[in-house]
Image: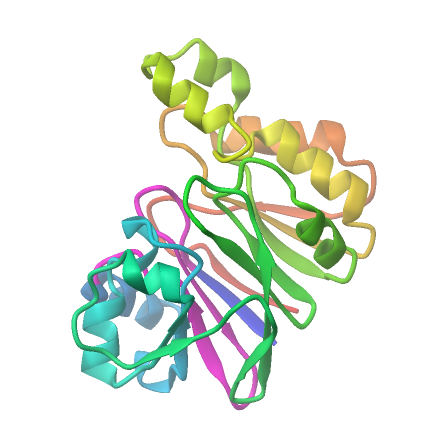
Amino acid sequence: MEVCVIASGSNGNCCLVENKNTSVLIDAGLSGKEIEHRMNKLGKSLENINGIVLTHAHSDHYRGVGILSRKYNIPAYMTKIVHQNTNLGKIQIKYFNNTPFKIGNLKIEPVTTSHDIPSCGFRIGKFGIFTDTGIATKEMETAMKRLKAAVIESNHDIDMLMNGSYPAFLKKRIISDNGHLSNTQASTFINNFGKTLNTALLGHLSGNNNTPQIAKQTFETLVKQKIECNILSRDKESGSWKV
């Protein structure tokens, strides 16, 4: 299986997961044109996508879904409540709940996360993707024990956030159990539950309250086992990994 990260950050999220026969996008939070451009740079084509799977109804995760679904006739997979809170226009919708489902020969297991609106991550084989969560949930812990590679939110450095310019209410939201994982929370989660992990992809970094250097330094300080650490870009495609 191959994983390509197209975008990761509050300005847009998109991840391609594919094997020999099936290709899916996890979220499509950039413009359709930009997703197409970045995928082409990675040697990938939207014409091969079998489904777009949504984590939750924030625009940085679904912005490009409508246009891509209509242009390439791609079904979009989401929960009913996500559909109710998005404005995607007339597209092909397929609902899932909290049980595993299949797109082609990829089995996709929703994994409960903890955000300020209903959200989930996913486990696909030995790969997992968990962003937009204020805590590492029990479901994330269970899924993590079976993974070789994972995209994990490492949103903010707590000192940068608390000493920064964000208003108090926004700081409170971010550090809440329904907000975003800090560097320390992400790396502690990986250290405690990523015993089979060999590749950590730290993503959804804040542009104001984090830096790639600080995120990686925190990881190297807290994670005791040998795991390859990659920091995902907010501004361009990050590359591809075999799982």
Q: Quadrant of residue 14?
A: bottom left
Depth order, front residue of 8/27: 27
Regarding residue 181, the answer to whether it shows in the image is: yes
Viewer-side residue, 45 vs 176:
176
Q: The C terminus lies in which quarter of the figure?
A: bottom right
193 relative to 170, above or below: below
Left or right? Give the position of 55 relative to 93. right
The image quadrant that residue 177 belongs to is top right
Say left or right for 170 vs 151.
Answer: left
Q: Position of residue 195 (x, y in %)?
A: 83, 51
Picture residue at 34% right of the left edge, 81% below the top: 75
Which residue is nearer to you in this view: 135 or 156?
Answer: 135
Query: Which quadrant of the structure image shows residue 124?
Result: bottom right
Magenta stretch in the rendered image: 6-31
User: Could you tell me residue 93's position as x and y percent?
Assistant: 32, 78
103 is higher (above) or lower (below) than 236: below
Residue 217 seen in this snapshot: no
Say whether residue 182 is magenta. no
Residue drawn 16% across and 70% down? 89
Q: Residue at x 50, y 35 (%)?
A: 178
Image quadrant in which the N terminus is located: bottom right
User: Above or below — where is 80 with respect to 121?
Assistant: below
Q: Give the residue displayed 47% in from the left and 34% down from the top.
A: 179
